[in-house]
Image (cartoon, rainbow, N blue to C red):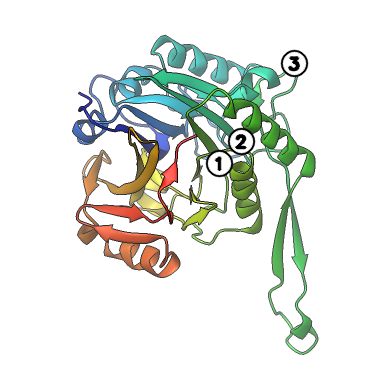
Amino acid sequence: MTSPGPFRMGAAGDINLEGFATDSNPFRHLMPYLGSLNLVVGNLEGLLAEPAELFYKRGFKHVGEGHAPNIAGAGFRMLNMASNVTYGAEAIDTTIKQLDADGITHTGAGRDRASARKPAQLTVDGKRIGMVSRTAVFWPHGHEATETQAGVVPIHVATLYQPLPRLVELPGLPPKIVTIPDAADVDALRADLTAERENADILIAFFHFGVSSQRDVVDYQRTLAQASIDAGADVVFGSHAHVIQPIEVYRGKPIFYGLGQVIFGWDFVARRVHPGQPGLLPELELEDDGQFRWSARFVKPREEDLEPRLVTPDEVPEEVRYLTAACPETVRFDGDRLVVSTGAADPGR
């Protein structure tokens, strides 16, 4: 049950429920914490539809129907659906119906482009929350939502390989990789955020972006994140990489480039590529005086059943070392959580 005091919003990265039963809640170890929050948002990484394998991603399947009550029961009330595995008109439609039935608002995918692009909106305990989302990771054919086709709202990104000057003397020298998001897509993103700013006390930009298994932020991630804040976003959340990426602050607003995963049932990721991989759960405290205060908790899967549990910084020393080195001016650790230093206290809008 939500405790009295400041409005508190949590966020989570990838939610993939493949292999989890529906008759018990796999978030049960997190629910005492999640239940203390006014709202939790996250990224749905696996449609709630018949477990058909995606033709372009060998071994990956939709996770099956019946999970929406457990997602809602854990406190998730707003989800990003724009991702590289949100594919197929029937599967998207089936998932949307289940989320709607359990009161979970969503954005980033839909039955057509207009519905996919429509921001998620929710009023919780007097606070208006809005979310705009995009994916830069998608299959180039049949994945993008159009006027007549279900799908996701993408950001198209060009990748360029720039030879470095010393290549003439160092054969095989790796090039500099430059990534540039499509200007029209960025303009549309800005327009959606600017319009939603008028309707929201807390405005979220949520992206599925970055390079899988890579901690480094690539150029286009920073371009999109900063453009979002310039357009009015209070925070930027990122997912897809399956690992925690850096946290930056731009104009007093936090950018969580990669939250990792909160729960992931697909064995290829959970048991082979990233066994035991921690994720990050950011938390906003919005005080009555309008001040935004950001922190985060770590989450990690239990080895025996992959169900997530909260862990302390002492239990994830590699993540602490990484974030301390990557974000020395942004991150500090205090007890059971990471505290994000945004500079001067951030006024609410």
**In-front residue for pair 297/309:** 297
Task: From the top left corner, tell me how far across and down residue 240 is, in percent.
Answer: 51, 45
**In-front residue for pair 298/305:** 298
Instruction: Give the residue drawn at x 50%, y 45%.
Output: 238
Instruction: Give the residue drawn at x 77%, y 69%.
Output: 162
Q: Which residue is mark 1?
A: 208
The amino acid beneath tag 2 is Arg
Instruction: Give the residue drawn at x 56%, y 58%.
Output: 217
The amino acid beneath tag 1 is His
Horizontally, residue 253 falls left or right of residue 167, namely: left
3 vs 1, front mark: 1
Task: From the top left corner, tell me how far across and down residue 178 is, in percent.
Answer: 71, 61
What quarter of the picture does the N terminus occupy? top left
Q: Earlier in the sequence, mark 3 or mark 2?
A: 2
- Asked if the residue at tag 1 contacts the one at tag 2, i.e. Cβ–Cβ closer than 8 Å, the answer is yes
Q: Is residue 186 above or below residue 175?
A: above
Q: Is residue 127 visible?
A: yes
C-alpha gap between disc 2 and disc 1: 6 Å
Q: Which residue is mark 3?
A: 148
Q: Earlier in the sequence, mark 3 or mark 1?
A: 3
In the rendered image, the residue lying farthest to the bottom is 169
C-alpha gap between disc 3 and disc 2: 19 Å
Q: Which element is circle 1 on? A: strand
Q: Is residue 342 above or below residue 283?
A: below
Q: Is residue 199 above or below residue 33?
A: above
The mark found on residue 273 in the picture is: none
Task: From the top left corner, tell me how far across and down residue 312 is, in percent.
Answer: 21, 53
The mark found on residue 134 in the picture is: 2
**In-front residue for pair 208/185:** 185
